[in-house]
Amino acid sequence: MSNIDLAYLPIVGRGLQINIICALHDIKVNLLMTKPMGEDFDKNTEAPFGTIPWLKDHSNGIELNDSLAIVQYLTNKYQGVLTPTSTENAALSAMYWSWAQDYYSFVLSPFHDIITGHNETFWRNLRLTDTLAEGGKELGVSNLTKLHHKRLQYLENHINKKNLGPFVTGEQCSYADIFIYTCVRTVQHTGGFEILREACEGDAFKDYPSILKICDEVEKLPKIIEAVGSKFKDCPI
Ligand SMILES: N[C@@H](CCC(=O)N[C@@H](CS)C(=O)NCC(=O)O)C(=O)O
């Protein structure tokens, strides 16, 4: 039995990248599914900030309730292929992770609300429900599709200008590449994101070949395919 508990939901979301990182670093985690989609954990009462992912390492008692804190902890404590190689590499890894985090928070998460019909008071309400209230789902999807292209274009231009490769921080894959990869494949393959694919006439990433190339490189790493399994096909979002 593993000494690390990780609570999340049965979706790709912000969870799969942590599972992939654990697989690459041979970290065994005990996965807990939280309410309302599971019965092992209650994020509202057990996680200090009421969000997931949430991690507890019983070997030292540390409890973490933020995905960046979790991946930085795991890749430094349990060293492996994704452990940053220098202070500079660590800063760049965190910066590119945060690009993915912003894309996730401001584009993918509001799409989750549209896909699942979620309309309770929430982190994103001032961005999303104002749009929904004023123009309904159609305007919401149209605005989020614009935002999708805008954020991706910045990253694409940056990769090309700086000639980054094969990974965002250079020769070695970083935990940021893993998050960029799970965001891209979620939009490409999960059932719920058909709505965004349709809004992009079938191919949401056709103008971003350098970002896609990074995802292809991530997929070539040993253990990735096994860790992913059929999750992009099976998970709704
Ligand atoms: N900064 C946090 C954001 C966490 C977050 O918003 N998680 C979402 C799921 S991906 C969540 O817990 N939503 C449910 C809620 O806020 O009640 C992180 O990256 O860990």
Image: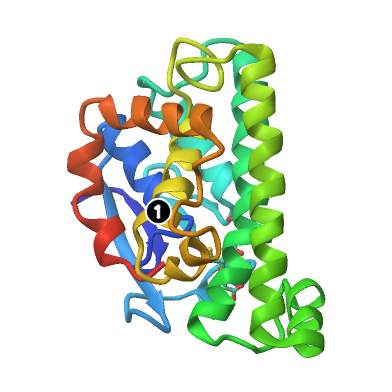
Picture quadrant of residue 120: bottom right
Q: Nearer the viewer, residue 116 or 142?
A: 142
Residue 97, given in percent of the width and then of the height, sits at 59, 37
Tell me, yes or no, if residue 58 can be seen here: no
Q: Is residue 17 visible?
A: yes
Residue 223 picture quarter? top left
Give the residue at mark 1: 188
Residue 23 pos. (x, y %): 27, 37
Query: Closer to the camera, 231 or 193?
Result: 193
Q: Give the x, y percent position of residue 123.
A: 72, 72
Q: Give the residue at x 33% y 41%.
A: 20
Q: Residue at x 70, y 87 (%)?
A: 136
Q: Position of residue 151 (x, y in %)?
A: 69, 45
Q: Which residue does the image show at 33% across and 66% down from the upper left?
A: 32
Label 1 residue near ligand 1, CB within 8 Å: no
| Image quarter of residue 147 | bottom right
Q: Secondary structure at mark 1?
A: helix
Q: How is the image coloured?
A: rainbow
Give me the residue at 49% from left, 82% from top: 116
Amino acid type at image mark 1: Gln
Q: In the rendered view, tell whether residue 80 sits above or below residue 225.
A: above
Q: Is residue 82 above or below residue 31?
A: above
